[in-house]
Image (tube, rainbow, N blue to C red):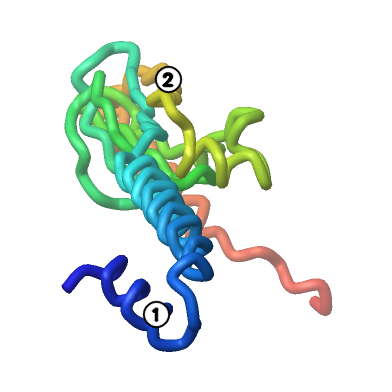
Amino acid sequence: MSFRELLRVSCRRKLSTPNECAPIGRVSRCLGFLALCVVTLLQTGCSQNMHRRMTIKSDPPGALVLLEGEEVGYTPVGIDFTHYGTREITLIKDGYETVTAMQKIRSPWYQTMPLDLITDNFSPVRIKDNTEYTFTLNRQEIVSNDQLLQRAKGLRSQAQILPKSPGK
């Protein structure tokens, strides 16, 4: 037995004439419309209409990228993310100095409160937020063994010279 039939049966039992059951038809249509609205809203919210992606590039390319200490790939690399904020990005490449940056990922205007509720869940179109960051890596200065030994001897001799005490 359907929901509509149950409503008609209960209506006939309570009311004296069948014409008084006419509002039940309107109620069932309203319930159907409400159910359709809920299903539509749930489908748009579950379809992930907001797509956030950041691309990390380096000069020169091919550096290993660590995001919050976890390897994500070699530059250029694209990473999907969910939340905006500050992220620790580290780039490592042989022959170049390691770069670590606390990079702030700024949210666009349509991702501010309360607009983000609408754009994240109820937008009829897919919204793409692509952000790109480029880092320049500096060549690592390579010191010869002789230069390194000379510097070590100089530091050792400076450490052996004791400062004169002020009381003597």
Q: What's under tag 2, amino acid-wise?
A: Glu
- Horizontally, is 160 left or right of 96 in the view? right
Image mark for residue 32: none
**Quick one: quadrant of the C terminus?**
bottom right
Which residue is at the front of the view, 71 or 167?
71
* Placement of 36 over or under 92, stated as above or below: below
Which residue does the image show at 48% across and 75% down from the upper left? Answer: 17
* Placement of 127 over or under 85, stated as above or below: above
Residue at numbered disc 2: 132
Distance CA(mark 2)–CA(mark 1): 67 Å
Instruction: State which tag comes first along the sequence, 2 or 1.
Output: 1
Picture quarter containing residue 56? Answer: top left
Which residue is at the front of the view, 75 or 8?
8
**Quick one: quadrant of the N terminus?**
bottom left
Residue 38 lies, in percent from the top left, at 41, 53
* Placement of 93 over or under 47, stated as above or below: above
Residue at numbered disc 1: 12
Number of numbered discs on residues: 2
Q: Residues within 10 Å of mark 2 (few under 14, many from 20)?
A: few
